[in-house]
Image (cartoon, rainbow, N blue to C red):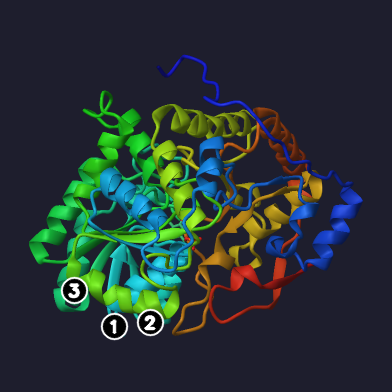
Amino acid sequence: MENMPYAEPWRIKMIESVKTLTKEERKKIIEKAEYNLFKVPAEDVFIDLLTDSGTGAMSDKQWSAIMLGDESYAGSKSFFNMKNTITDLLGFPYVLPTHQGRAAENVLFSVLIKEGNIIPGNAHFDTTKGHIEFRKATAVDCTIDEASDTTLYHPFKGNIDTKKLENVINKYGVENIPFVVLTVTCNTGGGQPVSMENIKAVSTLCKKHNITLIFDSARFAENAYFIKTREEGYQDKSIKEIVKEMFSYADGMTMSAKKDAIINIGGFIALRSNEIYQKACTFSIIFEGFVTYGGMSGRDMEALAAGLKEGTEYEYLHARISQVKYLGEKLKEAGIPLLEPFGGHAVYVDAKKFLPNIPQTQYPAQVLGVELYIEAGVRGVEIGTVLADRDPVTRQERPPKMELLRLAIPRRVYTNNHMDFIVWGLKKVWERRNELKGLKIKYEAEIMRHFTATFEQLS
Ligand SMILES: *Cc1c(COP(=O)(O)O)cnc(C)c1O
């Protein structure tokens, strides 16, 4: 299986043209964007690897499903189709649609989190952490130590260290821990999967202490692919069987459907508890909309249902994750320092090793992102000190252990020629790495500053 070449189990039916600019033009654009790639118009990007969120290509089946959308305010047929698909695939009886993943967090956390609470997890995603800290609660990272060594091979670097988790529970007390959040795959940790063994161990520990276990599930199908290909005993199971087992250990989930459900916008909460569901309904109505649409249109709920089925097919996942690996291996051959093993949805460049002379407080991963854009029109995203934000109490910078430039691959969008082009661009930046200078922040927001911060180049 491993040695057989792969090819995408689909062919291209429609294309979208992209603009090519010169390096000089891009220099002006990034200057105008004040060195924040979020402020660069998408039209001025050649290969957009900012995110794999909502950027996938829908299938003909999904586009046809769009035509079947029932736009009724209450009790839309499309809602029931989506809900039944979720219940069938993931096993949860209660489903609340939301307009995207962070909205699911907003609704669910409004029920579960109180000021002063502790929310343990594995390298919480930025919006998850944002929603926790916004409620004056604290996210505590319990990821295994192996995860922060970028070159160490571990098949499941998203795993929680159950000793750390137990210590956190003992230290703060069960009454202060409303739930544990397990992110599959772990985005912040580098798109790294969590093993079934670890899922079981975390679930057992939570059950022992009577703590709710919530999965942050954006890339649950990619996680299942890694369980199938890396974990003993799962080779012969289908992705759908593995997914079912994974969620059998959770009490609930939040989902950004913009990832593994391959749609452009949407999300949901799924739960086992009717009590939590009832309370969440109130917040859904305040924040998102009536409980059978929650910020989604009927047509998008139809596309979500179709996308969930396609996104949990092995052949699709194999082609997708193999493309990410293809990019990773080519970059590695070129000598670029990377986080290994490669993640499911992205390749992460180790900016500390790429630019050892730029201290973390001068944002080396941001510098690298800017330079890759100038060089090749490729837009990645900083997963480093800028993203880590300031400590909410001391307002000090808190440089994370890993300083990364993430190159996220949209689903079913680019060819391997694009991958080769990215490698070429990054090689050019690598050749002039000693000439690069750090950045300084000119403006930043109080929370989640990376989206809107502006920078200037240090001389
Ligand atoms: C994308 C993502 C979210 C937030 O979802 P949005 O749809 O972007 O709001 C939450 N958690 C993880 C792990 C994600 O990847």
Q: Nearer the viewer, mark 1 or mark 3?
A: 1
Quadrant of the image for the N terminus? Answer: top left
Instruction: Say what secondary structure mark 2 lies in.
Output: loop
Quadrant of the image for the C terminus? Answer: bottom right
Residue 334 versus residue 88 in the image, above or below: above
Residue 226 versus residue 444 in the image, above or below: above
Instruction: Say what secondary structure mark 1 lies in.
Output: loop
Is disc 2 in contact with disc 1, using a CB cutoff of under 8 Å? yes
Residue 136, image quadrant? bottom left
Specify the amino acid type for callout 1: Lys
From mark 2 to mark 1, how far is it between C-alphas? Answer: 7 Å
Specify the amino acid type for callout 3: Lys
Q: Mark on residue 114?
A: 1
Determine which residue is flagged by label 2.
135
Of mark 1 and mark 3, the one earlier in the sequence is 1
From mark 3 to mark 2, how far is it between C-alphas? Answer: 21 Å
Of mark 2 and mark 1, the one earlier in the sequence is 1
Of mark 3 and mark 2, the one earlier in the sequence is 2
Instruction: Say what secondary structure mark 3 lies in.
Output: helix
Q: Nearer the viewer, mark 3 or mark 2?
A: 2
For the question of whether residue 155 can be seen, the reply is no
Mark 1 Cα within 10 Å, few/some/many (few <14, many 20+)? Answer: some
